[in-house]
Amino acid sequence: MVVPLQEDGRLPVSLRGHLGGYEWRRDALGRSSACVFRLEGQGRPQLYLKIEEAGPFSELSDEAKRLAWFAGCGLPCPEVIAYESDGERNFLLMTALPGADLVSATALLPEERIEIFAFALSALHSLDIGSCPFDHRLDNRLAAAEARMRAGLVDETDFDEARLGKSAFFLFGELQRLRPANEDLVIAHGDACLPNFMAADGRFAGYIDCCRLGVSDRYRDIALACRSVAYNFGGEFVRPFLNAYGLTIIDPMRMDYYQLLDEFF
């Protein structure tokens, strides 16, 4: 469905000046709690608008801050045009990246896409953690996981198959019991799944959905990346992905732990 954007009278006045001549299309890819719209207008650059309910667990402010910081790192990501909140809804308007995400980029073979995926993660993980102001080490992520659990935001029906039927409270106890003794810190994307990485002309084109980016254990990304590769392309592609990334030996317990942590987000 195509809807003239300017007909939504609830948009903040400060946003409307950016949106003349655009139409919006709902973008259904991904599992964000925000509504995502692709904005297109003849002779105009393509934009994306995200809208979410304002509240203690909203993420668009986090994404705007991370994109603003990320823009100075020399790696491609959307440019923030505006972030606004009217107290009930938050709005994030940003530029679109070229190309297609690594699930939709079907002109590329799976082998090519996992090479791009590995390159993108390696480039991100090579950044200096001392330059990143966003601390997502385990103390902070476990506190966030507990807060979401106590607020009833953890969807127990959406757990991975191995954990279906278990309660969030039980799994949180497992997170505490199995916590790794140390962390191999990098700047992690935080939601390192194929739909959040873009490719254009056969090359990496940028990172999207960066609201959970921060200093974290490397396996916070590796665990989700391997799961995404297996889900989209098959388990036989996981080892080639890890080889391309440069991780010849994996820690299966750490892999399981960070997949468990992701159940809470």
Image (cartoon, rainbow, N blue to C red):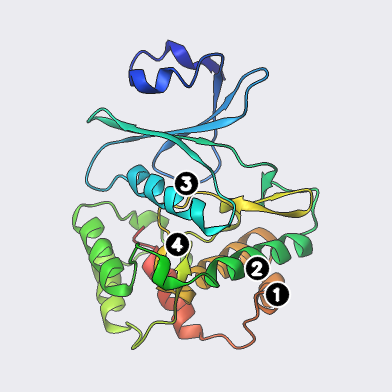
- The amino acid on which the numbered mark 3 sits, given as a three-letter code, is Arg
Residue type pointed to by label 1: Ala
Which of the marked residues, 3 or 1, is nearer the chain's N terminus? 3
Disc 1, SS = helix
Residue 125: x %, y % from top left: 53, 71
Residue of label 4? 190
Residue drawn at point x = 34 percent, y = 18 percent: 13
Q: Note whether 144 is above or below 162 in the view shown.
A: above
**Helix, strand or loop at disc 3?**
loop
Numbered disc in front, either 4 or 3: 4
Q: Nearer the viewer, residue 59 or 94?
A: 94
- Residue 191 image position (x, y, % from top left): 48, 59
- Measuring from the top left, give residue 72's x and y in whole percent: 50, 54
Frontmost residue, 232 versus 215: 215
Q: What element carries label 2?
A: helix
Q: Residues within 10 Å of mark 1 (few under 14, many from 20)?
A: some
Q: Is residue 53 left or right of residue 102?
A: left
Q: What whole-number distance in Å separates the C-alpha atoms at marks 2 and 1?
A: 6 Å
Return the mark for residue 70: none
Label 3 Cα crowd, 10 Å radius (few <14 / some 14-19 / many 20+)? few
Residue position for label 1: 244
> Disc number at residue 31?
3
